[in-house]
Image (tube, helix red, strand yellow):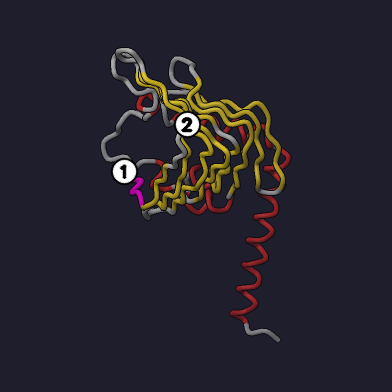
């Protein structure tokens, strides 16, 4: 017969397993409201908007299609034909914050548009949330890995005579763990006659980038 302590541990493990299965079942039944909740919470964090055309849930993995991140004027900044997001409902309960629900994010063939307007404003900067004294950035409490495959970037400087630059074969990852520095490993290939390759590898502080 098992000792009382071992029986308690097994009982707790069983309860957590049952709770996790129940949460996953609820997520599967209410994938629409869950997706709406995620988009609403994410949209709160910056002045732009996030839309997803369709999504389906298989276990804890949310597969989505045609995700678009737009600036405050409605101009698309990031467009993702398809991708997946791993959900962690029990971690969200432990952290008592919705950011704990979000895990690994994979983006397939994302297209990022970077623009500098005639007045010098960068479109990415317009997506930054307004500073709140004493508030921690959301990325500081996020744990997961962002993986990018087959992406591309279009850069345009609208000041003066204008300048265009394109990068293709955007690959790599950005690994974040709550309370720790992020590991960055990204690669791009410039669209030009001469072959080349750009790479960024290192660590990033999500609190003070």
Answer with the quarter of the image where residue 137 lies. Answer: top left
Q: Position of residue 207 (x, y in %)?
A: 32, 45
Q: Which residues are magenta?
A: 203-208
Residue drawn where x is 44% and y is 51% of the image: 176
Answer with the quarter of the image where residue 13 lies. Answer: bottom right
Q: Which residue is mark 2?
A: 193
**Secondary structure category for the residue under label 1:** loop
The residue closer to the viewer here, 55 or 168, is 168
Q: Position of residue 162 (x, y in %)?
A: 35, 16
Which secondary structure dominates the residues rendered in magenta?
loop
Q: Position of residue 79 (x, y in %)?
A: 55, 28
Q: How many marks?
A: 2
Please give the label number shown on residue 86. none
Answer with the quarter of the image where residue 121 lies. Answer: top left
Q: Position of residue 152 (x, y in %)?
A: 52, 33
The residue closer to the viewer here, 31 or 1, is 31
Left or right for 81, reference 124:
right
**Secondary structure category for the residue under label 2:** loop
Residue drawn where x is 49% and y is 48% of the image: 173
């Amino acid at each position: 017969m098992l000792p009382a302590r071992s029986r308690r541990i097994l009982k707790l493990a069983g309860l957590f397993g049952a709770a996790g299965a129940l949460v996953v079942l609820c997520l599967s039944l209410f994938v629409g409201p869950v997706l709406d909740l995620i988009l609403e919470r994410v949209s709160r964090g910056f002045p732009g908007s996030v839309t997803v055309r369709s999504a389906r849930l298989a276990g804890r993995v949310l597969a989505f299609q045609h995700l678009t991140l737009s600036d405050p004027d409605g101009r698309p900044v990031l467009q993702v034909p398809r991708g997946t997001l791993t959900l962690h409902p029990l971690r969200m309960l432990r952290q008592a914050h919705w950011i704990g629900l979000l895990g690994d994010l994979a983006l397939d063939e994302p297209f990022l548009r970077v623009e500098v307007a005639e007045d010098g404003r960068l479109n990415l900067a317009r997506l930054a949330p307004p500073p709140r004294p004493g508030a921690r950035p959301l990325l500081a409490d996020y744990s997961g890995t962002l993986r990018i495959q087959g992406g591309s970037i279009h850069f345009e400087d609208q000041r003066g005579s204008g300048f265009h630059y394109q990068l293709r074969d955007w690959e790599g990852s950005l690994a974040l763990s709550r309370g720790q520095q992020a590991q960055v490993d990204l690669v791009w290939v410039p669209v030009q006659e001469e072959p080349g390759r750009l790479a960024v590898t290192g660590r990033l502080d999500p609190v003070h980038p």
